[in-house]
Image: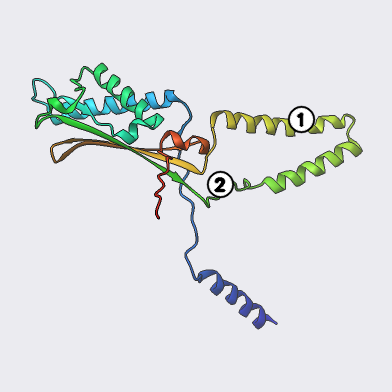
């Protein structure tokens, strides 16, 4: 009998140490902001302008006057809500940083800094966002037992509901401060070049509400008629 038990234990050890594919591991907990208002676009433009000004001061420490800046926008970007709004906001913030901002490319020279920005929307189709938190089933079982015990033995069985209302309020408080992940994200990249040289780069990733993806992406479709 002991031999069979030993063989069983060894079999379990071997089976746990071998697997046809790697075990999936989670990343450490991090935070990612969620864009839900035009004010958030203004915050982004402010931060980009501040960082660009500091980069220019470090890149051209001996310049009497910092190079002029031109924010470039394409026709496609101008038709997208974020594309047009971010263009106007960024120009405003750069001017507020006391930088020379050009209105068009006719005043270009070799020292002009050209600002480009781009938006990429990502739609995740198979993301597992909702896992029950550890201990939830034990808590539910304990709650059922407590209610049953309260009904049978407590003088005031209605008090048994208070732990659950407290848990619900705690969950609501978390929802208030944590807006929740979505299956749709946007990557916003801002780059600044002088001639063939990159002077500044900034990439941000945000959650967005799925119904708002057209704020960042041109969804117009082009149809070609043949025959």
Q: Earlier in the sequence, mark 2 or mark 1?
A: 2
128 over 189 or under it: above or below: below
Query: Which of 62/163 is in front?
Result: 62
Apparent side of residue 93 relative to residue 104 in the rendered image (left or right): right
According to the image, label 2 marks what residue? 129
Q: Residue at x 59, y 46 (%)?
A: 130
Snapshot quadrant of residue 122: top left
Snapshot quadrant of residue 156: top right
Mark 2 to mark 1: distance in Å?
A: 29 Å
- Secondary structure of the residue carrying numbered label 2: loop
Q: Position of residue 67 (x, y in %)?
A: 13, 25
Give the class, few, some or many, for how many residues have Cα within 10 Å of label 2's Cα (few <14, many ≥20).
few
According to the image, label 1 marks what residue? 162
Instruction: Point out which mark residue 76 bears.
Output: none
Q: Are marks 2 and 1 in contact (CB under 8 Å)?
A: no
Q: Position of residue 189 (x, y in %)?
A: 32, 38
Instruction: Look at the image and tell me in which quarter the N terminus lies.
Output: bottom right
Q: Residue at x 33, y 26 (%)?
A: 45
- Secondary structure of the residue carrying numbered label 1: helix
Give the class, few, some or many, for how many residues have Cα within 10 Å of label 1's Cα (few <14, many ≥20).
few
Query: Which of 173/36 is in front?
Result: 36
Q: Nearer the viewer, mark 2 or mark 1?
A: 2
Snapshot quadrant of residue 62: top left
> Does the rendering let one see residue 67?
no
Q: Position of residue 76 (x, y in %)?
A: 33, 36
Instruction: Look at the image and tell me in which quarter the C terminus lies.
Output: bottom left
Apparent side of residue 140 relative to residue 27 in the rendered image (left or right): right
75 over 97 or under it: above or below: below
Q: Residue at x 43, y 23 (%)?
A: 39
């Amino acid at each position: 009998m002991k031999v069979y038990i030993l063989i069983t234990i060894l079999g379990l050890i071997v089976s746990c140490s071998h697997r046809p594919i790697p075990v999936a591991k989670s990343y450490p907990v991090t935070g990612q902001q969620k864009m839900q208002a035009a004010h958030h676009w203004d915050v982004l433009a402010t931060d980009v302008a501040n960082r660009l000004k500091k980069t220019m001061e470090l890149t051209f420490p001996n310049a009497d006057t910092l190079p002029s800046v031109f924010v470039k926008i394409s026709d496609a970007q101008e038709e997208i809500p974020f594309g047009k709004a971010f263009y106007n906001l960024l120009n405003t913030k750069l001017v507020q940083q006391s930088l020379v901002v050009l209105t068009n490319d006719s005043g270009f020279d070799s020292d002009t800094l050209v600002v480009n920005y781009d938006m990429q929307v990502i739609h995740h189709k198979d993301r597992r966002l909702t896992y029950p938190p550890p201990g939830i089933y034990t808590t539910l079982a304990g709650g059922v037992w407590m209610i049953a015990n309260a009904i049978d033995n407590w003088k005031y069985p209605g008090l048994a509901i208070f732990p659950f209302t407290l848990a619900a309020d705690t969950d609501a408080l978390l929802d208030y401060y944590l807006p929740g992940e979505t299956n749709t994200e946007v990557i916003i990249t801002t780059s600044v070049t002088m001639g063939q040289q990159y002077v500044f780069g900034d990439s941000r990733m945000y959650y967005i509400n799925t119904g708002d993806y057209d704020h960042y992406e041109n969804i117009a479709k082009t149809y070609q008629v043949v025959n």
